[in-house]
């Protein structure tokens, strides 16, 4: 079973419990913060995956460091320690975030442009593209990408809408090469 499949199963189980208790937003926020802490502190993850330390010692560290986190999430972290799956936390956080967004009728989108988009432009893109993927709104992350030359490229999950000058030039180049 791929690591992503494992992470998705943990995320789905955590999401089901959080949804049942109506605390999805709180768990999501805590989970994203913890995943960020672990991402920024590689040594901490190395410590949590080091076989020299007992699971009990690792769970004590997790409990102490993340004592402010929701108890459901804290229990999940301890389970990950027991199952030797702490290295999957980043993927679990991503999958949980997607599940939470989907439940709220939103989706995560990355918009590549040559400059920072205004709030009005983000709103217009969200309104237009959300309908195309069957969502109410999009949570937009704007990435500055000078290579697009002009226009925007919108990525929602594994769907890409490419309306950039660079892609149009490439299409024109291919047409000219084929016809010669």
Image (spheres, rainbow, N blue to C red):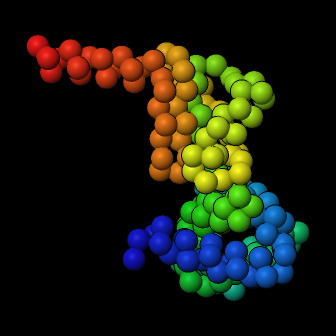
- Whole-percent x, y for residue 165 in the image: 45, 18
Quick check: 75 above or below 101? below
Position in image of residue 157 (x %, y %): 53, 51
Q: Would residue 178 appear left or right of 125 to someone viewing this image? A: left
The reply, left or right, for residue 150 in relation to residue 70 is: left
Horizontal side, residue 156 vs residue 158: left or right:
right
Give the quarter of the figure containing the C terminus. top left
What count of labels does the image hold? 0
Image x and y of residue 178, in percent: 15, 21
Q: Is residue 111 above or below residue 14?
A: above
Depth order, front residue of 161/90: 161
Q: Is residue 163 visible?
A: yes
> Which image quarter is the N terminus in?
bottom left
Does residue 43 appear anywhere in the picture? no
Depth order, front residue of 63/169: 169
- Residue 170: quadrant of the picture: top left
The x, y position of residue 53, in whole percent, is 61, 79
**Point 84% across, 72% down: residue:** 23
Which residue occupies 70% across, 39% down?
A: 127
Name the residue at 54% across, 21% down.
151
Q: Residue furthest left?
A: 180
Which of 87 and 72 lies nearest the eye of the viewer? 72
> Which residue is most to the right?
68
Q: Could you say which quadrant of the image residue 100 lies in?
A: bottom right
């Amino acid at each position: 079973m791929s690591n992503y499949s494992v992470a998705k199963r943990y995320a789905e189980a955590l999401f089901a419990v959080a949804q049942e208790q109506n605390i999805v937003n709180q768990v999501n926020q805590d989970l994203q913060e913890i995943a960020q802490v672990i991402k920024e502190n590689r040594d901490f993850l190395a410590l949590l995956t080091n076989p020299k330390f007992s699971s009990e010692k690792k769970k004590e560290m997790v409990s102490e460091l993340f004592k402010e986190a929701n108890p459901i999430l804290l229990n999940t972290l301890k389970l990950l320690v027991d199952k030797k799956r702490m290295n999957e936390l980043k993927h679990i956080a991503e999958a949980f975030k997607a599940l939470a967004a989907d439940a709220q009728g939103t989706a995560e989108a990355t918009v590549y442009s040559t400059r920072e988009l205004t709030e009005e432009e983000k709103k217009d893109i969200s309104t237009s593209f959300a309908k195309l993927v069957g969502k109410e709104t999009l949570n937009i992350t704007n990435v500055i990408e000078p290579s697009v030359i002009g226009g925007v490229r919108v990525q929602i999950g594994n769907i890409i809408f490419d309306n950039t000058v660079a892609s149009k030039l490439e299409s024109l180049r291919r047409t000219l090469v084929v016809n010669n």
